[in-house]
């Protein structure tokens, strides 16, 4: 159908993205650099970080201002391609 939406989201909206990877000093900086490229207004101070119980992995939650499905798709693609990132939800 021509009038069917491609996504259920209404833009712009706040959209949380969870990124998981091996715990390293470089992960948060690398993720921040990617996120800011896709959402220039993103405030790195709002990034939430949680270590796994064993301390080997860390999860980062970044709530971005999503402006389009294309923006989110590009952000997911760049994050999942990053060598330090294991999972993006």
Image (tube, grey):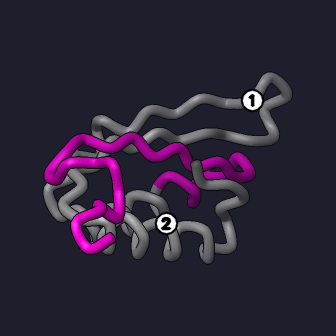
The x, y position of residue 41, in whole percent, is: 14, 56
Q: Is residue 25 above or below residue 68?
A: above
Residue placed most toward the observer, 81 or 29: 81
Quadrant in the rendering for residue 45: top left
Residue located at (75% from left, 29% from top): 52
Residue located at (69% from left, 52% from top): 21
Specify start and end residues of the magenta stretch as a single range: 1-28
On screen, residue 38 versus residue 67, left or right, reads right
Residue located at (14% from left, 51% from top): 12
The x, y position of residue 81, in whole percent, is: 62, 76
Label 1: which secondary element? loop
On screen, residue 78 versus residue 85, left or right, reads left
Q: Answer few, some or many: residues within 10 Å of disc 2's Cα (few below 14, many 20 plus, some between 14 and 19).
A: some
Residue located at (33% from left, 41% from top): 63
**Mark number for residue 52?**
1
Q: Which residue is mark 2?
A: 76
Quadrant in the rendering for residue 47: top left
**Mark number for residue 70?**
none
Q: Is residue 64 above or below residue 52?
A: below
Quadrant containing the N terminus is bottom left
The mark nearer the N terminus, 1 or 2, is 1
């Amino acid at each position: 159908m021509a009038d069917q939406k491609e996504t259920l989201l209404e833009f712009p909206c706040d959209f949380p993205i969870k990124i998981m990877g091996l715990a390293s000093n470089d992960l948060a900086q690398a993720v921040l650099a990617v996120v800011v490229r896709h959402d220039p207004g993103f405030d790195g101070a709002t990034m939430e970080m949680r270590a796994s119980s064993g301390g080997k992995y860390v999860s980062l939650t970044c709530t971005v201002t999503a402006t389009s499905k294309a923006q989110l798709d590009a952000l997911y693609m760049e994050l999942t391609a990053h060598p330090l990132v294991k999972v993006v939800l």
